[in-house]
């Protein structure tokens, strides 16, 4: 995948990438989402999402990711391992942070010369 990205990107081009971490946890993602919605939009909005939206999200979307990781079809990374993979591919990391309750890494990187 990285080789393909390099072939279609210009030098200096920006890559934004999100990938699961080895700490991927469906329940933590849902819990953090409920907390964030409650903080931004109030208790009622968080309750509606908790009862009507998140069960579907959990069963269809998040568990699919968990199954792909468990079956070895997708790769979850430790922070340093992910950093090195991107660096080896010829990118310079501008920013890296954990997102989705520590279940993934968000990376911004530029293609080096």
Image (tube, grey):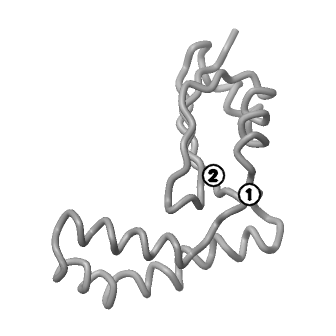
- Real-space Cα separation, disc 2 to disc 1, in angstroms: 7 Å
Where does residue 41 sit, x and y in percent of width and height? 17, 68
Mark number for residue 19?
Answer: 2
Crowding around mark 2 (Cα neighbors within 10 Å: few <14, some 14 to 19, many 20+) is some
Decide if residue 35 is on the left or right side of residue 62.
left
When asked about the image quadrant of residue 106, the answer is top right
- Give above or below for 26 relative to 8: below
Q: Identify the residue at horizontal 67%, vertical 14% (top origin).
A: 112
Residue contact between numbered discs 2 and 1, judged by CB atoms under 8 Å = yes
Residue 55 location in percent, x, y?
Answer: 43, 87
Tell me which numbered mark, 2 or 1, is placed earlier along the sequence: 2
Q: Position of residue 57 (x, y in %)?
A: 45, 78
Give the residue at mark 1: 76
Give the label on residue 58, or none. Answer: none
- Viewer-proximal residue, 13 or 107? 107
Q: Is residue 78 above or below residue 43?
A: above
**Element under label 1?**
loop
Comparing 99 with 65, the one in front is 99
Report the number of discs.
Answer: 2
Residue placed farthest to the top in the image? 113
Q: Quadrant of the N terminus?
A: top right
Residue at horizontal 33 percent and vertical 71 percent from the top: 35
Q: Give the residue drawn at x 65%, y 21%.
A: 92
Q: Residue at x 77, y 31 (%)?
A: 3
18 is higher (above) or lower (below) than 54: above
């Amino acid at each position: 995948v990285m080789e393909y990205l390099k072939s279609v990107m210009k030098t200096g081009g920006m890559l934004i990438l999100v990938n699961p971490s080895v700490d991927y946890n469906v329940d933590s993602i849902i819990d953090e989402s409920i907390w964030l919605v409650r903080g931004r939009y109030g208790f009622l909005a968080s309750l509606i999402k908790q009862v009507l939206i998140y069960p579907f999200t959990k069963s269809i979307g998040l568990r699919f990711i968990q199954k792909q990781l468990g079956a070895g079809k997708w790769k979850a990374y430790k922070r340093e391992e992910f950093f090195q993979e991107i660096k080896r591919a010829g990118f310079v990391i501008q920013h890296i942070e954990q997102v989705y309750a520590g279940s993934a890494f968000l990376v911004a990187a530029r293609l080096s010369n």
